[in-house]
Every structure is written in C-alpha cells, then in structure tokens.
Amino acid sequence: MVDWRIYEHPILEFDRGKEVTIYLDGKPMKAFESETVAAALYANGLREFSKSIKYRRPRGFFCAIGRCSACMMEVDGVPNVRTCVTMCKEGMQIKRQKYPADYLNPVLNLMKLPPAVYMRLMTKPSFIYKPAMTVMRELTGLGAFKKELPGPAPATMGNEGTLETDFLVVGGGPAGMQASIEAGKRGADIIIIDDKDRLGGQLLKQTHTFFSDVKYAAGKRGFKLGEQMIAQLSELPNVKVLTETSAVGYYPKEDVMLMKRPGNATLKVRAKKYLVSTGAYEKTLVFENNDIPGVYGAGGVQTLLNVFGVKPGNRGILLGTGNVALMVAYHLIQAGIEVVGVYAPSFRRVRGYFVHAAKIQRHGVPIVTRHTIVKALGKNEVKGAVITRLNPDYSPAEGSQFTVDCDFICIGVGLNPAYDLVQLFNPKMVNNGTLGGMVPIRDKTFRFAPNAYIAGDCGSIEEATTAMLEGGLAGLYVTEALGRGDEGVTTKIEEYTHALEEDRGSPFSTRLKAAIEEITVENIEEVLS
C-alpha cells in the first residue's frame, strides 16, 4: 500500500491522533484524526483532487490553507468542500466531483470563444433560454447538491447564537496570538478564531531557529515558539479559542461578525474592538502547465511536510530566492527529500538571508539566479521542468533551455496580504508593492477603522517576529482603548516599539520602513471621513 507519510524526522514528531478509515469514491483509505482530508488523500498517493470547470484539466492542491479552489471535493454529500482545511473523521465519504461535461471534454476544448460570446449563447429567442440553461447547468459547473432534501439536519448544523466580547481576534498566527496574550493578561474578555484545527499559523511550519530579539523569538524554532504561545493562551481563562472557525462577513450597521463553524453551523460575534490578523497567501508564476498536480506554493509544501508529515514528492525544485523559498528548500532536505536546485529570475543577488542560502548550499543544492521556469512537464502530474536563462531584458535566452527531472515544483515568489475581511470595515485601501499589495491606511496604534486594528502579514509582508511585535502592540493599544491602560501598559508599548524599530533596523529594510510611513497617519478618522 502506498504511504507518503514521514515516520522519522530529525526535529519533528508527528502526533497524528487516532487512525481512522475514510473512503474515496467507495475505496477505503488509511487516515488519522489530526490530518486534513487533503493530507490523508495525498499520503495515500492521490494527486488529482479536482478538474478545471471548462477544459477539465487536472487540479491538485496548491496553497493547503483554504485560499484556492483546487482541492474542492464532495465530502459526506456536501459539494465544493475545501479538503485542505477539513479534518478527517471515521467513515467519511469523499468523492471526486464528476459531470457529464467530462465526457464532452474533447468538444468543449474546441470552443475557444471570447467570454462575451458565451454570455450571449441561448439568450435569443427568449423562450429557449430557460430550458437551455437547465441543460447546460446539468452538463457543466462545479459541484451539485442532491436532488432530494436530506433528512433531519445533524445536531451540529444551525445557528449557535450570538456572543459578545471585548476583543475579537480573527487569525491565530503569531500576530493574533501575541495580541491575545497581551490583552488577555490585562483582563480583557477575548475571543480568538482560526479556520485551521489549531492555532499557530505559519509558526507551526517553521523548523528553523529564529535569530531576532532574544526576548521574543531568538534561539527558538518556529513550531516550538507556537507551542509556547498556545500554552500561554490556555492559561488565560478570559481568552476563548475557536478553531475550525471562519469569519465570513462583517456587518458595520449591526457591528457583528458572522462565523462559519464546524458542521456548517453559524455564529455571530459582537465585539467592542476587532483585530484582523489573517496573514497572507501565495503568489504564483505564469508558465505552461502551471496548474497541474505537483505545482505547489511554498507554504502548501511546508504545511504538507512540517504540519502533517507527508512528503510532497521525492525530487523537487524551488522557484524564488526569498527567505520562504530558501527555508522550504532546507525543510525538504531535513526530511530527506532531494532538492535539485533553487531557480529565480533575480539578476542581482539572493533575496533572502545569507544564512538560509548558505545552509542549503552546504548540502550541495545550487542556487541559480537569472533563470526561470518555462514549462512543467507532464499531463496529469509533474514529470519534470524546462528551465531557461534570462537576458538582461528578462526575455528567454535563445538556446539556453534545459530540462530538470523532478516530480514536484515549489513556487516561493512572495505573498499577497489577505485583505478580504479588512475591506468589509470600509477602510482606505492602497496598493503598495513594497508591502505586498493591497493594504489599508492605518494610524500609529494599528487602527484602520474606528473599531478595528490590523497586525501581521495582512498589513505588510514581513517576518514572523515582526508579526508578533505588531500583534503585541495592537493588543496593548486595544487594552488602552478599552480603558484598561496603566503605566505598565505604557512601558510595555515603549518596549515593543523599540524592539520593532530594531527589527526593521537593517539597511535592507529602508524601503519597507518608508512604505510603512507612507500608509501610517496620525488620525484615522480624518482619512475615513
């Protein structure tokens, strides 16, 4: 039986929980309660999770954090379930979503018409529109509900009511946890939510040792730091933790946040103050076959590898020379997986820290700049990659292409701030490339709306330590806004501010600091008025 799980690791121990049996299209598969459905299916050798809507091209998961649609499948009769954030349960029935359109694929592939043409098809004469749409919706689409209503809804479904709290923190990564710790220590009533099965965010994926301020993270491995912060939160009785919970909407007039809970139950939370610390998601590259199974985001590989202990493949390449790509390359080496090379179109230098680059080069992994990928080889999964050298104008150098033998391609070319929830507070948004993309204007207390604060990668793409410091400051400023401030809070704010300035004190952070100054104002109300 195929099993891609890692059972021996030099640093990590994987607590997978109780073994259970799940079923894919009726076939039993080995899984564990602490695995997501996607991780369990991948461990059993499945690479194709879904197909694209029109051309029915194979799709494997990409981000592993619920941000893309590539891993959506039918789970226990519910269509379009994000299997990368859905935990395994005994007897769970999973199905690949198949349609009559799969058999019409050769015909559909020939219909390469402009989108406007499709929108006008079957609209005239008017009497043909309704029956034509009925037929088309049967032939195409993504997911389908059952034709008959199910029996009584499970007890987990329905409305869980409304909770009221001082401080609602959305996102349980380093920023959200540190904010909850600081505000929680000072007596604020707090609810912190995360859509995963555990708190920790990116920290859970990081096995390397941090080297920032010793008071906060230096000398600690990321996952150990995450465990430490989770333990601190568990000791605060005024902090309520809700995992497997997604914030799906904020309604300003009612001042309420709507949550999706396990079992598709809903929950409303009304808070005096809100913190959005939802992190970021992967950017990707444009190249031929960049959508086939085996092309993953760096964060997706980290999740599969370091959280669930499942190998993404046997031989891979990395695209990008930032810290994320370099660290993921080292994580793969730690797990005994061959890294053929790290390639990036940068013409200057390796963009990440030298210490990360040196570690993988000591293991014989080449870091090749001025190169990029042209094509992923393979039809249903990655079988190799075509790499090319770049000219000074970034065009492919003629005759420089070569093929690399690999079974997965990991893209680590940066992150986009997850600003979806931020926008619902009606902030002033700006596009700032230095900070990662769309971010809100905020004041010096991290407030971007009258009752809402921001911290971490959803406000500016930086390091985990920076996210912790921003989260700690935001938590302290919320404490003051709630009327719980004192001299101790003021002193702590000064300490965090000094640490944050030191963290951004490198010459490489000059552009970053200037960008943050551009989006920081004295009075947020004046900007929003």
Image (cartoon, rainbow, N blue to C red):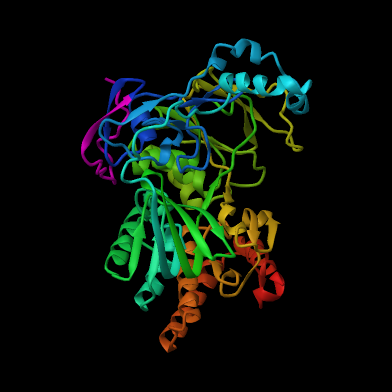
Residue drawn at point x = 34 percent, y = 53 percent: 223
Residue drawn at point x = 74 percent, y = 27 percent: 119
Q: Nearer the viewer, residue 238 or 294?
A: 238
19 within the magenta span: yes
**Quadrant where the C terminus lies?**
bottom right
Q: Position of residue 350 (x, y in %)?
A: 58, 46
Residue drawn at point x = 56 percent, y = 70 percent: 446
Q: Position of residue 71 (x, y in %)?
A: 47, 32
In this view of the protein, can residue 53 be seen by the observer? yes
Which residues are drawn in magenta? 1-23
Q: Position of residue 75 (x, y in %)?
A: 39, 32
Q: Residue furthest front?
A: 127
**Quadrant where the N terminus lies?**
top left
Q: Nearer the viewer, residue 15 or 111?
A: 111
Q: Main secondary structure of the magenta part?
A: loop
In this view of the protein, can residue 363 be seen by the observer? no
Residue drawn at point x = 67 percent, y = 42 percent: 347
Instruction: Tell me where residue 444 sits by quadrant.
Output: bottom right
Above-or-below relation of 253 to 310 = below
Q: Is residue 11 left or right of residue 127?
A: left
Above-or-below relation of 512 to 488 = above
